[in-house]
Image (cartoon, rainbow, N blue to C red):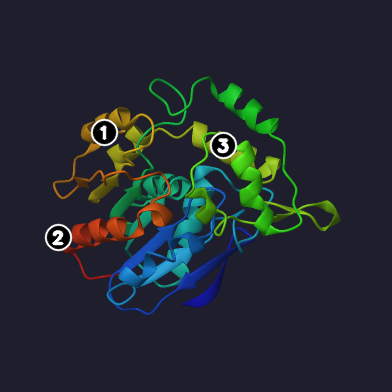
């Protein structure tokens, strides 16, 4: 994988690109993470596909810009990455926040997307009726505004702290901390928590996303992979049934799957994606 730098509206975006071995797949990581979260899945795609991974703005090695976390700018970031790499159309694979942004990119630029693969993302509004979280947008933003920022000397301290303070704790979070973005604090300390000023912008965007509207605008087939063990699976499946329009779209619930599928069930997730991609009948040459 070679490293590329993309500048979009003055913000530096970090991109990794593999060999051009076939159709393009762009991978989009979860909130707070980095593109390294895909490491256990990429070997299953590298021989037959042209792989691109990008760190979202404010994450990983991309610039931690002060602004630009609205959905319009996020879509333009994705477009800029495809433009720089000379890709006309791509398959998009996203988990959590990455899938949310991929969903709206597919709605905004339907001609640029061959298929959309959402790993427990883009299936349930964050707030509102049957939303992921209770309360209003104002309530949610106030909660994030008041969140304390834990400070550490080393990355190795992240997981022990989380084991004591996160409830409920799940051992797969141990893997998650290998892929989180590290943010510098004063006095040489670091944290895994997104700076409050950036996080509030992201959450304001997330609170305003309505996925039913997005699916009404897209034309590509979609593979929905809702996590079986996460809350409100029934709500997700209900929305999927309501918005599924493309005849090649598909829904698969991997047994015992959790939200962060790239580190929880990388093999099973990859096999479902490959089967879906293999079965697609596409209408034009690869991008």
Q: Earlier in the sequence, mark 1 or mark 3?
A: 3
Disc 2 and disc 1 in contact, CB within 8 angstroms: no
Residue carrying label 1: 237
256 or 208: nearer the viewer = 256
Q: Position of residue 34 (x, y in %)?
A: 54, 58
**Residue at disc 2, secondary structure:** helix
- Measuring 43% from the left and 62% from the top, which residue is drawn there? 38
Q: Quadrant of residue 259?
A: top left
- Up the image or down, 6 lies above or below 211; here it is below
What is the CA distance from the residue labelled 1 to the residue labelled 3? 24 Å
Residue carrying label 2: 279
- Measuring 51% from the left and 68% from the top, which residue is drawn there? 15
Residue carrying label 3: 203
**Residue at disc 1, secondary structure:** helix
What is the CA distance from the residue labelled 2 to the residue labelled 1? 22 Å
Q: Earlier in the sequence, mark 2 or mark 1?
A: 1
**Residue at disc 3, secondary structure:** helix
- Up the image or down, 19 lies above or below 237; here it is below
How crowded pointer 1 is (Cα within 10 Å; few <14, some 14-19, many 20+) is rated as some
């Amino acid at each position: 994988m070679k490293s590329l730098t993309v500048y979009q509206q003055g913000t530096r975006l970090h991109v990794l690109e593999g060999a051009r071995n076939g159709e393009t797949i762009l991978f989009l990581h979860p909130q707070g993470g980095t593109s390294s979260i895909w490491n256990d899945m990429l070997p299953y795609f590298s021989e037959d596909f042209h792989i691109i991974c990008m760190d979202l703005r404010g994450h990983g090695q991309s610039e931690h810009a002060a602004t630009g976390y609205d959905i319009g700018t996020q879509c333009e970031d994705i477009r800029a990455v495809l433009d720089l790499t000379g890709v006309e159309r791509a398959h998009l694979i996203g988990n959590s926040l990455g899938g949310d942004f991929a969903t709206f990119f597919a709605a905004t630029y339907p001609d640029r997307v061959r298929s959309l693969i959402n790993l427990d993302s883009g299936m349930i509004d964050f707030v509102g009726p049957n939303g992921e979280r209770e309360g209003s947008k104002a309530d949610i933003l106030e909660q994030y505004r008041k969140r304390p920022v834990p400070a550490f000397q080393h990355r190795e301290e992240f997981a022990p702290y989380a084991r004591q303070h996160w409830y409920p704790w799940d051992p797969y979070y141990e893997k998650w901390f290998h892929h989180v973005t590290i943010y510098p604090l004063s006095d040489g300390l670091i944290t895994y928590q997104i700076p409050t000023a950036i996080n509030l912008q992201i959450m304001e965007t997330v609170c305003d996303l309505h996925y039913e509207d997005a699916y009404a605008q897209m034309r590509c087939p979609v593979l929905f992979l809702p996590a079986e063990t996460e809350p409100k699976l029934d709500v997700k499946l209900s929305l999927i049934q309501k918005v599924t329009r493309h005849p090649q779209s598909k829904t698969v619930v991997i047994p015992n799957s959790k939200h962060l599928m790239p580190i929880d069930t990388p093999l099973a997730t990859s096999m479902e994606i490959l089967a879906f991609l293999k079965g697609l009948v596409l209408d034009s040459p690869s991008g």
